[in-house]
Image (spheres, rainbow, N blue to C red):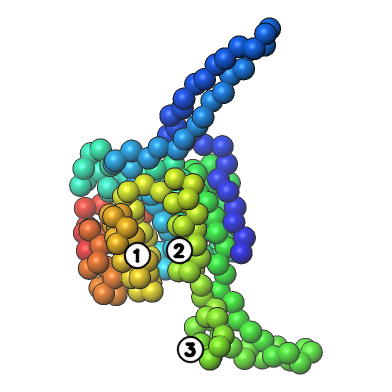
Amino acid sequence: MAVEEPGANPFNLFYFHFEFECSTFKFVFFLLFFYPGPYDFSFLWDLENTKVASRLVDQIFTNVEGSLKTLDERYKLADVKLVVGNLRLDFINENRPLLRSQGCRLVDAPKRQRVCAYENCGVVTQRSYTKPYPNERPFDVADRLMLQELQRLVFEKQLAQNILLATGDSDFRSTIQMLQANNYKVFVAAGRGANCSYVNEAEHGWIWEDMSTRISENFI
């Protein structure tokens, strides 16, 4: 698994400042803490099911935050954003520096497939979208990687109490339920025609195609 950390970004930090002197030396210590406010949103983005045109990537976070503010003007995106999926997608490759500068933690979960082991055969013997074979790990593991990275954010105290999950994958229903069981409020941005079994679990929902391209009040 490849994880690309965000670039330099002004986190919401508060700190304690300690000083003491010993002989002719002064020692100064700063303890820094990430402190998401009560109206901050952690943004979790599943790339596979909620794509966007390359030319619109630089507008996504402005549009998403503006759409959140249609519910409450105090809502805003937290500094750290979790982006999970195939990082080889064109709209990611073309905008990687921009995404990192926006505080995105990029986690690679590529679609994979297995080919015949015979030399120069090239026949695909297992595609990523086929039913999993017994005792084999599914090839599309974005939802599992999302859970793993969520745990990391919890341990690092970088996960806000409000979460916006952008996905069209019904496998994330268990992720939503897990977060809600731990007192997180989960909001969803899903594509048109998304599986309602997980959309209905959320506090509120938007249509991704609208939310990602403009400030939207088009609720699911």
Going from N to C along the chain, the mark reached first, 3 or 1, is: 3
Pick the front one: 26 or 97: 26
Displayed quadrant of residue 94: bottom right
Q: Is residue 214 visible?
A: no
Residue 30 point in image, percent of width and height? 54, 25
Q: Name the residue under label 3.
A: 131
Nearest to viewer (mark 3 / mark 1) = 1
Give the distance between the C-alpha atoms of the residues marked 3 and 2, in whole angstroms. 22 Å
Drawn side of residue 145 relative to residue 50, left or right = right
Q: Residue furthest right?
A: 119
* Image location (x, y in percent) of residue 146: 47, 63
Tell me which numbered mark, 3 or 2, is placed earlier along the sequence: 3
Q: Please determine whether, in this image, residue 52 is positioned above or below residue 63.
A: below
Q: What residue type is labelled 2?
A: Leu
Classify mark 3: helix, strand or loop. loop
* Residue 190 pos. (x, y %): 32, 65
Q: Which residue is drawn at 62% across and 91% down?
A: 125
| CA distance for labels 2 and 1 | 9 Å
Q: Is residue 190 above or below residue 24?
A: below
User: Is the residue 120 above or below the residue 146 in the image?
Assistant: below
Q: In which quarter of the image is residue 49?
A: bottom left
- According to the picture, the residue beneath numbered tag 1 turns out to be 178
The answer to whether the residues at label 2 and label 1 have Cβ atoms under 8 Å apart is yes
Mark 3 vs mark 2, foreground winner is: 2
Indicate left or right for 54 with 194 as reference. Answer: right
